[in-house]
Image (spheres, rainbow, N blue to C red):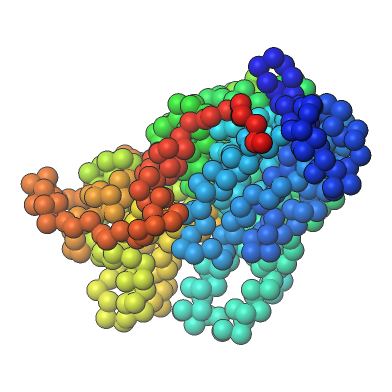
Amino acid sequence: MTSDGALRSSQWFGATGRAGMGHRSWMRSQGFTPEVFDGRPVIGIATTWSELAPCNVHLHRVAESVKRGVWQAGGFPLEFPAMALGETLLRPTAMLYRNLLAMEAEELMRANPLDGVVLLSGCDKTTPGLLMAAASVDLPAVMVTGGPMLNGKYQGTDVGSGTAVWRFEEDLVAGRMTQEECVFAEGCMARSNGHCMTMGTASTMASMAEALGMQLPYSATWPAVDARRYETAQRAGQVIVGLVRDDLRPSAIMTRAAFENAIRVNAAIGGSTNAVIHLLAIAGRLGVPLALDDFDVLARDVPTLLNLQPSGQYLMEDFCYAGGLPAVMRELAESGLLHADAITVTGSAVGANVADAPCWNREVIKTMAEPFQPAGTGTAVLRGNLAPGGAVIKQSASSPHLLKHRGRALVFDSPTDYYAVSNDPDLDVDEDTVLVIRYCGPRGYPGMPEVSNVALPRKLLLRGIRDMVRICDGRMSGTAYGTVVLHVSPEAAAGGPLALVRTGDWITLDVPARALTLEVSDDDLAVRRAQWQPPAAHASRGWTYLYTEHVLQADAGADLDFLVGASGHPVPKDSH
Ligand code: FES
């Protein structure tokens, strides 16, 4: 709405003279009757549909359901494309482009005659990218994520997309699986529309959108091919028209309380460490004070309730049938771990939304009294002379015996360097070694890819070793597992202490004490720092140049420095 309470779209479609004629006439070339310009709310539907983003490929159908709901509620829906980021194809990493999607979508929402937006996302970066955009524009918004795939099925067992990839690769290297079996398994893992169906980053961020109050209850878990996915979309179309009329905007929904709810929900569902970076970036757009340490402090009292891969056994389809996210949130609310009064896109408070949420399967959704994993096993934030800006580790995906560990570093300046020797039977490595993989941060790779959980050296896999401590300034897929210290900040490419580690140095990881220590004196580190040369720039032009010049470190959400904050939605000047 404008400051005088009028719909902002009326500035375009309600205009008189040549400008208004132009705005209406060209829209009518699509076959709309004049009634659509009668002052009804104009709802943009931002879709990240693309055949290059397979997790989002059904969103054009979801958009049709949203449109039905908008028409039903008396609005005027207009679908528009936003940058589709497919996790599986984009190089060097989809994360390099999250901020570009956020910037593009923000500008499109602001520059067009929209009164509200429905955000259609799915694959990992599309959900945070659109939420960042909506936060900076602050028009009423509802998110509809595309939903998870059906469970993967292989040789009579359920297999999780993403999570199974890591296991199949290890089995192939160790000779437990043939290449032909791997090719067959590929088709079994991803067998329907939808995003990854483990508690990977896409499922996590869908859950975060629901926990923040930005998508309707149960939206995160309906499978992509379930009719109720489309019902939810239609309902979202109705809801957004009401949000415009009530002028209920993202800044009123995504408050500090909502972020605290999301952080606790992330702990309860065993969510991805990527949620840390994305939530920090979204909060930065809204001016909500949120710090890396909040993720540790707020999550410490929260047990993992969900028995889902990669931390547990089941998959998103099972989660849906067990009761979905409201059943988890009800457990938290009844234990006083949820700000029940946080308002949501339903117009009701989150506590009311989940108060009667049933659970149909306690194998999948555990209780606070008998959790899947006890409190304190979520994402921990580590600090020390190796990570002065912080680092994170997902305890529930780690091996308990490695959470306190001291070992000698084996250092590689890229995953490529490591994989060049990882199959060498003479590689000087054992299960106590700490693998350091660096120059994988936002500026370093660039884009902070999900490469941190490098596969174990073949020599160790053949001995039956399945985990070892790895330390990296990059990220890890939410579908992955292992004792991996992630997001080390500042990154090596920014001159962080990680750049100064040498093979043979002793490193101590003490997760209970939240400490990550390089056992090298300050004096020796100063000598090494004087000898350190920053890596050459990745690009001298284009997006990669802009990105590497302006990207913030992981502990600040890896947004671009000039995109932090919001500009709202006024556009005072006409175009002609
Ligand atoms: Fe798109 Fe996993 S690859 S959600």
Residue 300 left/right relative to 360 = left
- Total labels: the figure holds 0
Residue 239 position within the rendered picture, expressed as x and y whole percent measured from the top left: 79, 31
In this rendering, the answer to whether 157 lies above or below 180 is above
- Report if residue 363 is visible in the image: no
In this rendering, the answer to whether 218 lies above or below 411 is above
Residue placed farthest to the front in the image?
A: 18
Residue 114 position within the rendered picture, expressed as x and y whole percent measured from the top left: 71, 34
Residue 71 position within the rendered picture, expressed as x and y whole percent measured from the top left: 88, 37
**Nearest the camera: 361 or 327?**
327
Residue 299 left/right relative to 213 = left
Q: Quadrant of the C terminus?
A: top right
- Report if residue 113 is visible in the image: yes
Q: Quadrant of the N terminus?
A: top right
Residue placed farthest to the top in the image?
A: 4
**Nearest the camera: 354 or 148?**
148
Residue 178 position within the rendered picture, expressed as x and y whole percent measured from the top left: 56, 84
**Nearest the camera: 427 or 132?**
132
**Nearest the camera: 550 or 477?**
550
In this rendering, the answer to whether 216 lies above or below 164 is above
Q: Which residue corresponds to the image point at 78% horizontal and 48% vertical from the top-left?
A: 63
Q: Which residue corresponds to the image point at 33% horizontal and 41% vertical from the top-left?
A: 390
Residue 542 left/right relative to 160 = left
Q: Which residue corresponds to the image point at 77% horizontal and 54% vertical from the top-left?
A: 60
**Residue 289 quadrant:** top left
**Residue 56 quadrant:** bottom right
